[in-house]
Amino acid sequence: MKKLGGEKQATEHQTSDVVGLYTPEQRIRRDESRWTLVQGILAPVQFLVFLVSLGLVIRTLTTGVGYELATASIVLKTLFLYVIMITGAIWEKEVFGQYLLAPAFYWEDVFSFLVLALHTAYLLALFTGALSSTALLWLALAAYATYVVNAVQFILKLRSARLQSASQAAENSLRESVSALSAGRAVA
C-alpha cells in the first residue's frame, strides 16, 4: 500500500483494505448495470456447459466413443467463455472505468488470459489439424483445469466482498446504536 496525503491508496494491482472490492460509487454502478445480471446468468450456464463437456471428454478419453460430441461441447464451452469474457469486460468498464485489469480483479483477469489462451489454442489446433484427437482432448482438459482455478478465484473474491459488505453493515449499525445511546445520555 502506498500512503498519499495520509490516506491508504491501492497500489496498481491491489485493492485498498479501506475500500474493499468496491467503492460506494462502484457498488452503485455494479447494482445498476444490466451487465451484472448478464454475468450472473452466463457464469452458471457456462459452468453447466463445462460440466457436461467435461463428462463427454472424459468418456471419450476412457472409451474412445463420442469424439464428435465431445468436440462440439468443447467448442460450445469455448464460445461461452468468449461471450462471458466480452460481457465481463463491458461490465468491468461500467463498474471500474476500464475494460480489463481493474485493480479489484487484476489477478483474476490475468489468469483469465491463460484460460483464453488454452481454449484458443484448442480451437486453433482443432481447425488446423495440428494435434491428434487424443492430444486435443488432453489440451481441452488442461484448458478446463485453468477454467476451474479461475472460477474459484472469482468465487472467492465475490464471497470475500459479500462478507466484507455484511461486516461493514454490522459495523455501521453498531456505530449508529452507540451514537444514539451517547446522544441520549448527553441530553439526560
Image (cartoon, grey):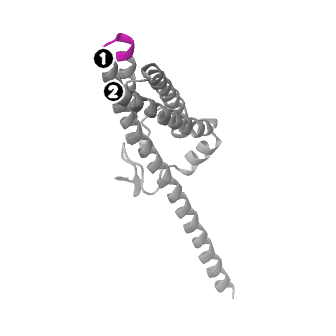
Label 1 environment density (alpha carbons within 10 Å; few <14, some 14–19, many ≥20): some
- Expressed as whole percent of the image width and height from the top left, the position of residue 44 reads 55, 39
Of the two numbered discs 1 and 2 on the same chain, state the one appearing first in sequence: 1
> Which image quarter: residue 17?
bottom left
The residue nearer to you, when weighing 27 against 166, is 166
**Do the numbered discs 1 and 2 sit on residues whose CB atoms are within 8 Å?**
yes
Residue shown at 60% from the left, 37% from the top = 41
Q: Which residue is mark 1?
A: 131
- Expressed as whole percent of the image width and height from the top left, the position of residue 98 reads 48, 34
Res 125 seen here: yes
Identity of the residue furthest to the bottom in this view:
188
Q: Amino acid at mark 2?
A: Leu
Q: Which residue is mark 2?
A: 139
Label 2 environment density (alpha carbons within 10 Å; few <14, some 14–19, many ≥20): some
Tell whether 55 sits left or right of 30: left
**Does 130 appear in magenta?**
yes
- Expressed as whole percent of the image width and height from the top left, the position of residue 161 reads 50, 53
Callout 1: helix, strand or loop?
Answer: loop
- Expressed as whole percent of the image width and height from the top left, the position of residue 113 reads 38, 31
The residue nearer to you, when weighing 15 against 60, is 60
Q: Which residues are magenta?
A: 125-131
Q: CA distance from mark 1 to mark 2?
A: 9 Å
